[in-house]
């Protein structure tokens, strides 16, 4: 295992870091997709207010590449489409049905991954709406599907104070994560770096079996751009890909189960949070639902 030591950086001294405790939240009644918060994408609506949608059905497409589509995080009715200045699409709100119907996608057994072509896996991720989870340096847009990256970085944890700890979202999902890594190795032709802080790579620890690139130092030593800078040996490696460790689980769930994945681990922290912990919820859940009855009295600003 190679270790990178970054000398420069910052100490982010923020109070209220989340504890290692995990809780599972109730399912919300509404979910939302926020196209305004997706960088680079120029969204075009594929639905109208009042339409009925299924979990995994198309909500928007990217005008730059209409093969890239963003799917519904729940099944139900399009309750509202909220626009900002110049008709920027801010929110697509889905009111959930009690029984959610779901779009069925192609499934891949783990033993079949080696026999499946790279093109088939790429197409499955594009069709399943998860291709944009993979980013390309230096601009951090989603990559072209027909390009093989010089390397792919999988980041397990970050040095930002309120980021979910990898031990929390990997707990009980070890086999699923291994399945996801197998898919990524196929996409990057085995040039995959699984990265974590040296403190999380102790022999026999929960991450030690996967990590092949450790880093030490202050924020932002975890950043894929920093890691690429310290490992690259040619200009072509400026276009490396990267993906967050929790997103690897989403890719694995989609390909293994054939259903658009929705489970997400978030951290609850800050000086105004009564119970600082990790919470298991759904993608698209409103902040008011996640933080309900968990903040101290007073007016608090929520930062995502």
Image (cartoon, grey):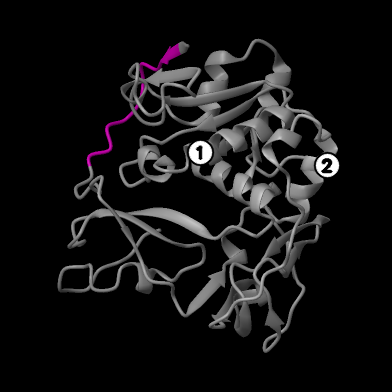
What residue is at 69 percent from the left and 21 percent from the top? 190
**Residue mark closest to the camera, 1 vs 2:** 2
The residue singled out by tag 2 in the image is 120
Specify the quadrant of the image occupied by residue 288. bottom left
Describe residue 176's horizontal placement relative to residue 292 as left or right.
right
User: Residue 51: within the magenta?
Assistant: no
What residue is at 25 percent from the left and 68 percent from the top? 300
Specify the quadrant of the image occupied by residue 286. bottom left
Describe residue 16's horizontal placement relative to residue 117 as left or right.
left
What residue is at 41 percent from the left and 36 percent from the top? 157
Q: Position of residue 229 (x, y in %)?
A: 56, 19
What residue is at 30 percent from the left and 66 percent from the top? 301
Return the mark for residue 130: none
Question: Does 137 appear above or below 121?
Answer: above
Residue 192 in view (yes/no): yes
Classify 10 Å Cα crowding around label 2: few (below 14), some (14-19), many (20 and above). few
Q: Earlier in the sequence, mark 1 or mark 2?
A: 2
**Which stretch did the figure color magenta?**
3-13
Q: Position of residue 284 (x, y in %)?
A: 51, 66
Q: Secondary structure at mark 2?
A: helix
Q: Position of residue 55 (x, y in %)?
A: 64, 70
How far is mark 1 from mark 2, CA to CA? 22 Å
Give 203 or 73, whichever is nearer the viewer. 203
Do the numbered discs 1 and 2 sit on residues whose CB atoms are within 8 Å? no
Describe residue 70's horizontal placement relative to residue 170 as left or right.
right
Residue 268 in view (yes/no): no
Give 150 or 248, whichever is nearer the viewer. 248
Return the mark for residue 245: 1
Describe residue 254's horizontal placement relative to residue 218 as left or right.
right
Q: Quadrant of the C terminus?
A: bottom left
Classify 10 Å Cα crowding around label 1: few (below 14), some (14-19), many (20 and above). many
Q: Secondary structure at mark 1?
A: helix
């Amino acid at each position: 295992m190679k270790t990178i030591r970054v000398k420069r950086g910052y100490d982010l001294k923020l109070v209220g870091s989340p504890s290692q405790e995990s809780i599972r939240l109730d399912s919300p009644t509404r979910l939302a997709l926020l196209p305004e918060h997706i960088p680079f994408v120029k969204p075009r609506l594929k639905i109208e207010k009042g339409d009925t949608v299924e979990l995994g059905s198309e909500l928007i497409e990217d005008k730059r590449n209409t093969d890239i589509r963003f799917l519904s995080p729940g099944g139900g009715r399009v309750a509202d489409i909220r626009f900002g200045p110049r008709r920027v699409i801010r929110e697509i709100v889905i009111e959930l049905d009690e029984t959610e119907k779901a779009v069925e996608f192609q499934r891949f057994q783990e033993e079949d991954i080696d026999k499946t072509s790279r093109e088939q896996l790429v197409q499955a991720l594009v069709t399943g709406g998860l291709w944009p989870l993979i980013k390309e340096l230096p601009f951090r847009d989603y990559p072209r599907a027909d390009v093989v990256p010089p390397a792919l970085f999988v980041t397990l944890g970050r040095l930002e104070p309120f980021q979910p700890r990898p031990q929390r979202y990997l707990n009980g999902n070890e086999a699923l994560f291994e399945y996801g890594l197998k898919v990524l190795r196929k996409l990057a032709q085995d040039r995959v770096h699984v990265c974590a802080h040296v403190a999380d790579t102790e022999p026999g620890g929960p991450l030690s079996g996967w990590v092949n690139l450790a880093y030490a130092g202050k924020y932002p030593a975890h950043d894929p751009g920093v890691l690429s800078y310290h490992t690259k040996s040619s200009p072509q490696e400026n276009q490396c890909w990267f993906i967050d460790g929790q997103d690897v689980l989403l890719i694995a769930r989609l390909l293994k189960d054939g259903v658009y994945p929705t489970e997400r681990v978030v951290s609850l922290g800050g000086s105004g949070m009564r119970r600082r912990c990790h919470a298991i919820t759904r993608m698209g859940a409103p902040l008011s639902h996640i933080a309900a009855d968990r903040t101290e009295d007073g007016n608090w600003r929520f930062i995502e």
